[in-house]
Image: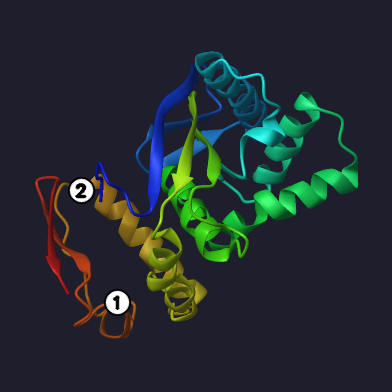
Amino acid sequence: MLSDQPDFLKISHQAGVYAHEVTDVIRPLPWIETGDSEWSLLSYMDSLHGAYERFVGLGGTNQDFDELFDFNVYHMPFAGISYRAHRAMLQVRGRFTRSEIEENFNRKVKPSLMYPQRIGGTYGGCVFTALLSLVANAHHITPGQEIGIFSYGSGACAEYYTAMVGEKAIQIAKNASSDKLLDNRLEISVGAYEAIERQRIAQIKSGHFVPDPTFPECCYESQYKGQKKLVLRTIENYYRHYAWS
């Protein structure tokens, strides 16, 4: 929930924005994604440096990258890219040995990877998954500390901004019980997964869709029923209708 008196994170108004045109990842149809993974990685790194330079220019700071932030969070289409990004930023801003980079990464970034590694790619939501993971898993985090955040979107646009850890952030992260939720996930067969994918593609191509609560077997009963979660009931002429489980 957004508020002028935030309990979890206080996001700064200062943000460095960077954009350029690149077809690193494209979706010619809603159910097809293609692109050049190497080009995408280069675009990501260019955008990281560009957004950070704008961020520094707006704030007029001469502080070293490592000195500015207590922690760092990166957009993660896959978790490993956060190490490459952090290493690149440290190497540009100063002289670090390999062991120093690894120590710095483990202390400032690695706690943010715990949930993204277990969940997988979540596109735009990965930054917020990483933020929750950081607060929940960085045992040395305290209210008032600064987090440097990099957000990226293919095409390409990027933003670098900061957030301050709120007074109730640690308790909120614990109350979220994310580890328990992840532990309670339902394991399905490869065949069931493929059937879900076929159903998803068919739904994308159609303006009307009614989910089957009996498939996969026992999923709705064990994961949703009576738990007051928002679930999709129907899609009618492309309008989605939800209800509480």
Q: Position of residue 90 (x, y in %)?
A: 76, 33
Per the model, the C-alpha gap separating discs 1 and 2 is: 19 Å
Residue 188: in sight, yes or no?
A: no
Q: Between 39 and 159, which is closer to the camera in this rendering?
A: 159
Quadrant of the rendering where the C terminus is positioned: bottom left
Secondary structure under tag 1 reads loop
The quadrant in which residue 111 appears is bottom right
Where is mark 1, residue-wise?
215
Within-10-Å neighbours for mark 2: few <14, some 14–19, many 20+: few
Amino acid type indicated by mark 1: Phe
Q: Is residue 2 above or below residue 226?
A: above
Q: Is residue 8 above or below residue 229?
A: above
Q: Position of residue 14 (x, y in %)?
A: 43, 25
Where is mark 2, residue-wise?
206
The quadrant in which residue 213 appears is bottom left
The residue depicted at 49 percent of the width and 48 percent of the height is 144
Q: Position of residue 120 (x, y in %)?
A: 53, 58
Left/right placement of residue 200 relative to residue 53 reads left
Q: Position of residue 99 (x, y in %)?
A: 89, 48
